[in-house]
Amino acid sequence: LKYRYALSVHINSNNTLKGEHARMLLIGNGRLITRDNGTYYENGAVAIDGKLIKEVGETAVLKARYPEAEFIDADSGVIMPGLINMHNHIYSAFARGLSIKGYNPKNFNDILEGMWWTIDRKLTHENNRLSSLAVFTDCIKNGVTTVFDHHASYYDIPGSLDDIAEGATSLGVRASLCYEVSDRDGEKKRMESIEENERFILRAQKDDSDMLKGMMGLHASFTVSDKTLRECNERRHGAGFHVHCAEGPGDVLDALAKYGKRIINRFYDNGVLGDQTLAVHCVHIDRHEMELLRDTNTAVVHNPESNMGNAVGCGPVIHMLREGLTVGLGTDGYTNDMLESYKVGNIIHKHNLCDPTVAWGEIPAMLFENNRAIAGRYFEHPLGVLKPGAYADVIVTDYDPLTPMDGSNVNGHILFGMNGRSVVTTVCNGKVLMKDRKLLVIDEKALMQECRESASRLWHSIND
């Protein structure tokens, strides 16, 4: 298939190719949130050399120090690190607006079977590639520069992770990818999904760009047998697992009925837990399971909008944090706007615990500190922070504070004053992907037209 979209290349007055590394790049004249021990500059700048940050400081000082650098003027906006999404489902993008005949879910399992498993059994390579481009484009527009994705497309599994990787690579976004292993569609599909993970893990391990990573994806405890877990463990080549854990109560009941143990205990016994693993959701876990996750240094990922939308409950996130777990923040495909996820996370735990004092500090710590720490387990240089030696992932928003802003209150300004569409400029790995809200790496209008045509074909295949 030959797509009609075209990657766009723009040339500035200094003949620097946008989307390619400038010799030296300086982003300044903005309120600079470094996320480096609370360091804040009222008029700060970030100096970028290749794919890494060289220096941060006052704009006037850095402009004098690097007079030949290409300068991006933040125009008194806010400069801060690129955002990280610890759990996404790119393949779900083409479900937007879809109505499936006979779909009338009564619980979470009905949603899985009636919506998501119905869709993923029809997804083609064309759908995968285009949804990947569309989602990564939206990530750029929302200031998200690193995405941990969990893919499923059981119609045609082999090579499907390459479809997703193609979108990330062509647009310049950093990504960790995996395929959702499950027993639900039979032995052939089960083996293909394991092999797809193994193939991509090995591919990513040979990629020296540090822009692509591979993990061993698992759907959830109730759709994977002990045999499947053993085989995944044998073929993951040191990579961690990316797995849904105790998202709905049915998952827990299944583990107790089949194995006589709770989900986290079962995963512990099968070698799934560890510091390279992402345990996603963990809505229905008890204190002992929290202790297992903590003691194995397994990262947990909370997805507040998804949990609310699927009516599965509110995860014990505040308790997990108090127990010393590392809990990050994702979106589960609901949105590509991490600041939206921040807002919902701030509200859901206040509502659930009937306590207006919680989540003020916990949720921004998850987004801005824990996501950075978790991502740092996989990538060579620091992410989510503006300091020398970190990857040059930088975003600029157009936010102009109506009250005083400094290093002590930036989270309040972000929570109540910004959203993803506040982002005007996005740089990832030292490459300018969007400047002044103009995408420099793709023709979005042509892409959206192509997506609509492809989604229409998918919808017809589902309902015909």
Image: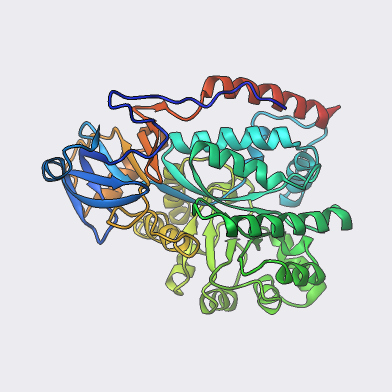
Q: Is residue 295 above or below residue 96?
A: below
Q: Is residue 362 above or below residue 421?
A: below
Horizontal arrangement in the rendering, residue 360 relative to residue 312 (left or right): left
Residue drawn at 54 percent across, 37 percent down = 170
Measured from the top left, where is residue 112 in percent x and y? 74, 48
Measured from the top left, where is residue 459 in percent x and y? 76, 28
Name the image quarter holding residue 263: bottom right
For the C terminus, the quadrant is top right
Residue drawn at 84 percent across, 53 percent down = 189
Residue drawn at 54 percent across, 70 percent down = 298
Measured from the top left, where is residue 86 in percent x and y? 52, 54
Residue drawn at 71 percent across, 44 percent down = 160
Q: Tell how many labels.
A: 0
Q: How is the image coloured?
A: rainbow
Q: Can the viewer see residue 209 in this picture?
A: yes
Horizontal arrangement in the rendering, residue 154 relative to residue 298 (left or right): right
Q: Is residue 205 above or below residue 265?
A: above
Between 415 and 74, the one lying in front of the other is 74
Q: Can the viewer see residue 106 in this picture?
A: no
Between 94 and 401, the one lying in front of the other is 94
Horizontal arrangement in the rendering, residue 391 relative to residue 73 (left or right): right
Name the image quarter holding residue 290: bottom right
For the N terminus, the quadrant is top right
Between 166 and 231, the one lying in front of the other is 166
Measured from the top left, where is residue 283 in percent x and y? 59, 61
